[in-house]
Image (tube, helix red, strand yellow):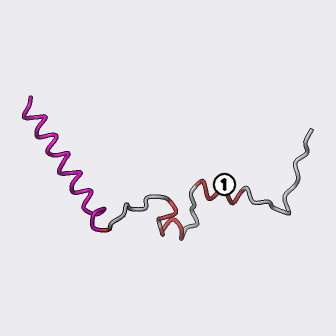
């Protein structure tokens, strides 16, 4: 039982160490945000925050809503 836990902790520690090598070499975390992906930008795909910001811009040609 103790052997299994030790092996599991050892494997997890090795995986974390290997995953952190790229962060240590580059000195920063990778940008996993949608706007950081150049292929999505080429296709015109933006994150929801950017799309919401663009949608909230006042459109002079928009039909005004009628308030009751």
Q: Is residue 21 above or below residue 10?
A: below
Q: Is residue 48 left or right of residue 14?
A: right
Give the extent of the magenta segment: 1-25
Q: Could you say where residue 40 lies in the image, as x and y percent from the top left?
A: 51, 65
Pick whichever, 38 or 33, lies toward us. Answer: 33
Q: Is residue 43 above or below residue 13?
A: below
Quick check: 40 above or below 49? below
User: Would residue 53 be found to the left or right of residue 60 on screen?
Assistant: left
| Image quarter in which the C terminus is found | top right
Residue 6 sits in which quadrant?
top left
Q: Report which quarter residue 8 is drawn in.
A: top left
- SS at mark 1? helix
Q: Is 55 part of what is drawn in magenta?
A: no
Residue hosting label 1: 52
Looking at the image, which residue is at 16% across and 41% down? 9
14 drawn magenta: yes
Q: Is residue 49 left or right of residue 67?
A: left
Q: Position of residue 2 (x, y in %)?
A: 8, 31
In percent of width and height, residue 39 lies at 48, 68
Quadrant in the picture for the N terminus: top left
Looking at the image, which residue is at 27% across and 67% down?
Answer: 25
Residue for point 57% across, 61% down: 46
Q: Residue at x 57, y 62 (%)?
A: 45
Q: Which one is nearer the viewer's eye here, 28 or 49?
A: 28
């Amino acid at each position: 039982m103790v052997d299994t836990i030790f092996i599991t902790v050892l494997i997890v520690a090795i995986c974390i160490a290997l995953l952190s090598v790229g962060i240590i070499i580059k000195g920063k975390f990778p940008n996993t945000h949608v706007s950081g992906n150049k292929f999505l930008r080429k296709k015109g795909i933006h994150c929801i925050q950017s799309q919401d910001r663009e949608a909230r811009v006042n459109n002079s040609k928009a039909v005004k809503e009628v308030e009751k």
